[in-house]
Amino acid sequence: MPFWTFFGLQKGKATTPWPRRDQATGQEGVFGMPRFEPERCAPECSECAAICPTTAITVQPGRNGKDRLAVDYGRCVVCQLCVEACPADAAHASFDWAFGVRDRTQLILSDDVAAIDESPKERQSQDGFRRSLHIRHVDAGSCNGCESELQALNNPFYNLHRLGIFFTPSPRFADLLLVTGPVTYAMHEPLRRAYEAMPAPRWVMAVGTCAVSGGVAGGGYACGNGLEGVLPVDVYLPGCPPNPAAIIEALLMFLGRIPQKVKGGRVVS
C-alpha cells in the first residue's frame, strides 16, 4: 500500500466542514484587522496615524472642532503597529479576518451599521453562477504573499473544489478575474486584455490590500493605487495577505451563498 494512502486512511478526512453553520473555520487565533474605538482616543493624539505605513489611519477635523480618527481598512496591511503604538487602547488586536465587501466604501470605518444591501449590481446578474464559478488569476506585481494563500485553497484542508469553485488557466473560460498585487503600470494592458477576453457576464475581484488600494507600494514610480481606475471591481478583499478562509468567505459572499459580514468597517454578523 502506498505510504500516502496508508497515511490518509489513518488520519481520516482532512477537509474542514466549514462553511456550514457553526462549524470551525480553522482560523482560530489568527490575527485579523485591528479594531478601533475612536471615542477612547486621547485628545490631540495621533500616534497610530503617524506610524501607519499606508495612511490607512488619519486624523481629520470633526464636529465641534474636535479631531476625529478616520480608518480605511482598504489600505490596512494588518501590521498591528497601530495596536502597539496606541496609548489609550483605542486600537486593539482582533480576529476579524473576513473582510470581503462589494462596495469599497464599506471598508471605511463608520458608525453606520444599517442593513447591508444584498442585491446584486444592476449591470450583471450572478444568478447563474451560484453553484459553480471559474476564476482566472492574474498577478499584477504581487510579492507572492497572496499567491501563497491562493495556493493553499487547493490543499486537502480548504479543498476549494468541493464548493464548485475552480481556477482556469484561460480568461476565455473564466467568470471572475481575480487580481493580486498593486497593479503596476506595465500590467495595465495585460489586465485589460484578460478582462476583454472573458465572456460576459464577467466580474473582477481585488484580493489583498495591494490590489484594493496599492498597499505599501501604492503611488510609487511603478504603480498607481491598485485596480482603481483600471477595471471595474465587484469584490474587494483587503489583507496582507488575506488568509484562505477570507478568500473563500469573499467568494461565497459574491455568489450570494453567505451574507456579507462587514458594514461601515465593522463586522456586524
Image: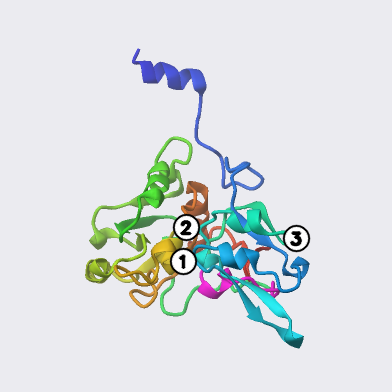
Q: Which residues are magenta?
A: 102-113
Q: Residues within 10 Å of mark 1 (few under 14, many from 20)?
A: many
Label 1's element?
Answer: strand
> For residue 103: magenta?
yes
Lower position in the chain sequence, tag 1 or tag 3: 3
Lower position in the chain sequence, tag 1 or tag 2: 1
Kindly indicate the quadrant of the structure image that contains residue 228.
Answer: bottom left
> For residue 101: magenta?
no
Q: Magenta: predominant secondary structure element?
A: loop
Q: Using residue 139 as the reference point, say whether residue 121 is left or right of it.
A: right
The residue wearing badge 3 is: 88
Q: Residues within 10 Å of mark 2 (few under 14, many from 20)?
A: many
Q: Decide: marks 1, 2 in contact (CB < 8 A)?
A: yes
Q: Residue 1's spot in the image, x, y percent?
A: 35, 12
Task: Name which residue type carries label 3.
Answer: Ala
The residue wearing badge 1 is: 235
Foreground: 113 or 188? 188
